[in-house]
Image (cartoon, grey):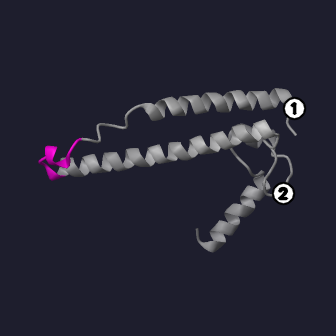
Amino acid sequence: MLNGKKRAYFKKWLSQRLTNLLSDAEKPIRDITLSLEDYQDFTDQASLESDLGLTLHLKERESNLIDKIKGALERISNGTFGVCEGCGEDISEKRLKARPMTTLCINCKRKEEADEKMRGM
């Protein structure tokens, strides 16, 4: 189990990361109001669609990361941060430093990935 000083470290790190992500999320993606008709060339239209698709995909990933960080902060608050949701054992500090939003210890994560691989996911 993590001591108070280490929990405070992760809380501060996660809070800062969340603040940065939320401030970036407020920035406009791009002027999506641009109409494809503004681009007469099909290559320019395709490029714009591709850029917008990639930008939206990245914003979706950021949104998922925000949710994971909020979950980790909630686990810090309720005292379950650093405890594996799979087996109930402590998650190693090394793993938490690499992936502070994790909910699984390395052994449970490996098992989960092996199960997904067997199911073809």
Disc assigned to residue 113: none
Q: Position of residue 106 (x, y in %)?
A: 76, 52
Q: Position of residue 22 (x, y in %)?
A: 52, 33
Q: Earlier in the sequence, mark 1 or mark 2?
A: 1
Residue 52 at what x, y percent from top left? Answer: 33, 46
Look at the picture and state if 110 lies above or below 10: below
**Neighbour class for label 1 at 10 Å: few (<14), some, many (≥20)?**
few
In the image, farthest residue toward the bottom:
119
Count of picture labels: 2
Q: Amino acid at mark 1?
A: Asn
| Quadrant containing the C terminus in the rendered view | bottom right
Residue 111 is one of the magenta-drawn residues: no
Q: Amino acid at mark 2?
A: Cys
What segment is highlighted magenta in the picture?
Answer: 34-42
Whether residue 11 appears in this view of the structure is yes
| Left or right of 55, for residue 74 | right
Which residue lies under the disc numbered 2?
87
